[in-house]
Amino acid sequence: MTILVTGAAGFIGMHVSKALLEKGEAVVGIDNLNDYYDVSLKKARLKELEPYGEFTFHKIDISDRDGLQQALENEEITSVVHLAAQAGVRYSITHPFSYAESNLTGFLTILEYCRNLEGLEHLVYASSSSVYGGNKELPYSVEQSVDRPVSLYAATKKSNELMAHCYSHLYRIPTTGLRFFTVYGPWGRPDMAYWLFSDAMQEGRPIKIFNNGDMRRDFTYIDDIVNGILKTLASVPVDGGADNPPYRVYNIGNHRSEPLMKLVSTLEDAWGVTAETELQPMQKGDVKETYADIEPMRRDVGYEPTTSLEQGIPQFVDWYRSYVKES
Ligand SMILES: NC(=O)c1ccc[n+]([C@@H]2O[C@H](COP(=O)([O-])OP(=O)(O)OC[C@H]3O[C@@H](n4cnc5c(N)ncnc54)[C@H](O)[C@@H]3O)[C@@H](O)[C@H]2O)c1
């Protein structure tokens, strides 16, 4: 079994690749190492994977379909975990076309690659909690309508689910979309609040608190996410025939909606500082609250997150200290 992991130099991609390699699977990683955030962090993540003999890496852009075919020509891929995307809500306001290239054209390229792959067992891909837009009913359930995205990023992720449905229907490709809810942890992303707040706390700068702190997030620790992805990969959706293609979408969150100020106080405890705060209005494209109903994923694949914010944040802070010291 050889698993293609796209976005392997990214936060979640590196952890998923490592977990698969630890289990003895062969992993082919691809990533274009774009400069949305510090490329040296992406290279450092790849260094974590290089020691594994069963790991192969190709620097390739998923929107380059000829390049992708060529790079993967001799690989015998049996499953795909598709995580490469232009991530980040706010950046999609200023850089819309990079979202079209990576998240729409790139996603189609992956679907087409899967369509032409003989014996593909399962395509698992990243969607996002942002598809819920301004939905008011909490917790967010996959039964809810998600036709009102409030950012282009969210619109591309919802589009991915529609495109996956189409390929599952037309070509009977087993697909599972996972709507991630605010993932954090070691080797995380420098554009996300827990990292930006940590930088500011270390440098004695005030932290920016949007919507005057009136926000809640379902923060999900990376190890829980990785367990969920691996369990999902092993649980292939069944083809129910005709109008029941092998297609599923799940929320993958922690099922605990925490106030933003709790993130701040947990970081303050972990860093041993008191943060100076600067209250700001709501940012365009942001949503006020997220909270995942994870029951379907719990029932179908046995997903069971166990890490609280109080347990996960110190893990991130310990890693950040050692990473910053070494780099
Ligand atoms: N981290 C979260 O909280 C979160 C929440 C919701 C959804 N997601 C989704 O999960 C997936 C992984 O997110 P992450 O947090 O690891 O982000 P990340 O930015 O760390 O990882 C994405 C990786 O994809 C690569 N990439 C982007 N465009 C590419 C392209 N055109 N060709 C090849 N590689 C490309 C990037 O270089 C990066 O290394 C993404 O699809 C993201 O949208 C993440």
Image (cartoon, rainbow, N blue to C red):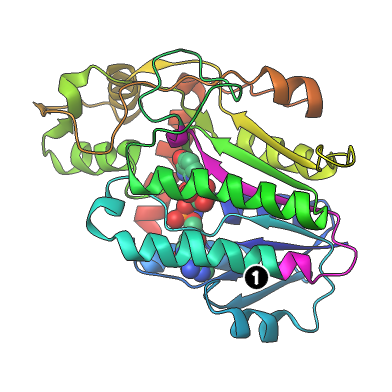
- Give the side of residue 183 with respect to residue 98, left or right: right
Residues rendered magenta in the picture = 113-131
Residue 86: say if magenta: no
- The image shows residue 130, relative to residue 18, as above or below, that is above
Q: Residue at x 39, y 48 (%)?
A: 153
**Residue at the (76%, 39%) spot, across then down:** 232
In the image, what residue occupies the spot 54% across and 79% down? 64
Compared with 61, 314 (above or below) is above
Image vertical order of residue 193 relative to residue 71, above or below? above
Question: Residue 100 sits in which quadrant?
Answer: bottom left
Q: Residue at x 54, y 60 (%)?
A: 84
Instruction: Residue 52: give x, y in percent of width and height.
Output: 73, 67
On-image quarter of the C terminus? bottom left
Instruction: Name the quadrant of the N terminus.
Output: bottom right
Q: In this view, does 166 lie to the left or right of 312?
A: right
Along the horizontal axis of the image, is 325 left or right of 205?
right
- Judging by the rendered image, the residue that carries numbered circle 1 is 50
Percent x, y of residue 322: 42, 50
Q: Residue 183's spot in the image, x, y percent?
A: 49, 37
- Give the quadrant of residue 96: bottom left
Kind of residue sitting beneath label 1 = Glu
81 and 127: which is toward the camera: 127
Residue 162 location in percent, x, y?
59, 46
